[in-house]
Image (cartoon, rainbow, N blue to C red):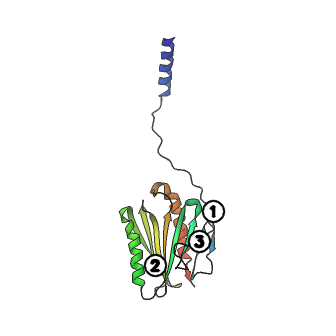
């Protein structure tokens, strides 16, 4: 009886090892991305842009003294684009330097930082978009200005641990939305 059991286990072992075994690579959950549709921002703020219908706008409650700071919230993706607005009173260089410092604080974790210039003189919209690659806390930041009176700074943050591999499809998706926001941005 023991001999038969040993023989059966031996045969099953031989038959189960006919193919090379390779472990499965680590996978990530499939993310269903919504259809892209946009709407205009409210008239209460001194600037206007189109934002996705699967997002909502929220007054930034942490900045009570700043009326026109808003957050574009992506609840499904646990992401937010924080928009801060400032009036320029001869202090453009201060706002520009603050933006630059906020962006380049991410160099510790970033693989690279690409800069794209925004130049739309017909709408008086100028600025820079910073694409921060890697496992940085913020993957995209930008500023937009008319260079004389208005300044808006934007920063994308996820409310999850940064992992460029798992965030990659969502990041590409949200970057397209931010590009649309910037392309449709106007001063009132």
Dots 1 and 2: beta carbons under 8 Å? no
Q: Mark 2: which secondary structure? A: strand
Residue 58 numbered tag? 3
Residue occupying image coordinates x 44% and y 67%: 131
Among numbered discs 1 and 3, the one appearing first in the sequence = 1
Report if residue 108 is visible in the image.
yes
* Left-right relation of 141 to 48: left
| Place of residue 144 in the rendered image (x, y in percent of width and height, measured from the top left) | 48, 79
Instruction: Locate residue 71: give its quadrant.
Output: bottom right
Residue with the mark numbered 1: 35
Label 1 – label 2 distance at C-alpha:
28 Å
Mark 1 neighbour class, 10 Å CA radius: few under 14, some 14 to 19, many 20 or more: few
Q: CA distance from mark 1 to mark 3?
A: 22 Å
Identify the element where label 1 is drawn.
Answer: loop
The spot of residue 168 in percent (x, y) is 49, 58
Locate residue 75, reporting x and y percent: 59, 62
Q: Residues within 10 Å of mark 2 (few under 14, many from 20)?
A: many
């Amino acid at each position: 009886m023991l001999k038969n059991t040993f023989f059966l286990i031996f045969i099953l072992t031989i038959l189960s090892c006919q193919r090379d075994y390779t472990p499965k690579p680590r996978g990530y959950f499939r993310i269903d991305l919504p259809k892209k549709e946009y709407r205009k921002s409210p008239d209460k703020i001194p600037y206007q842009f189109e934002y996705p219908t699967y997002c909502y706008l929220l007054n930034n409650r942490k900045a009570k003294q700043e009326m026109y700071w808003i957050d574009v919230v992506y609840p499904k993706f646990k992401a937010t684009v924080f928009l801060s607005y400032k009036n320029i009173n001869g202090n453009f260089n201060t706002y520009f330097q603050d933006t630059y410092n906020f962006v380049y604080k991410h160099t510790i974790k970033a693989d690279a930082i690409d800069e794209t210039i925004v130049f739309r003189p017909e709408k008086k919209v100028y600025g820079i978009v910073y694409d921060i690659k890697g496992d940085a806390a913020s993957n995209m930041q930008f500023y937009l200005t008319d260079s004389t009176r208005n300044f808006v700074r934007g920063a994308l943050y996820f409310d999850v641990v940064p992992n460029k591999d798992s965030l990659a499809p969502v990041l590409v998706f949200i970057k397209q939305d931010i590009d649309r926001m910037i392309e449709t941005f106007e001063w009132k």
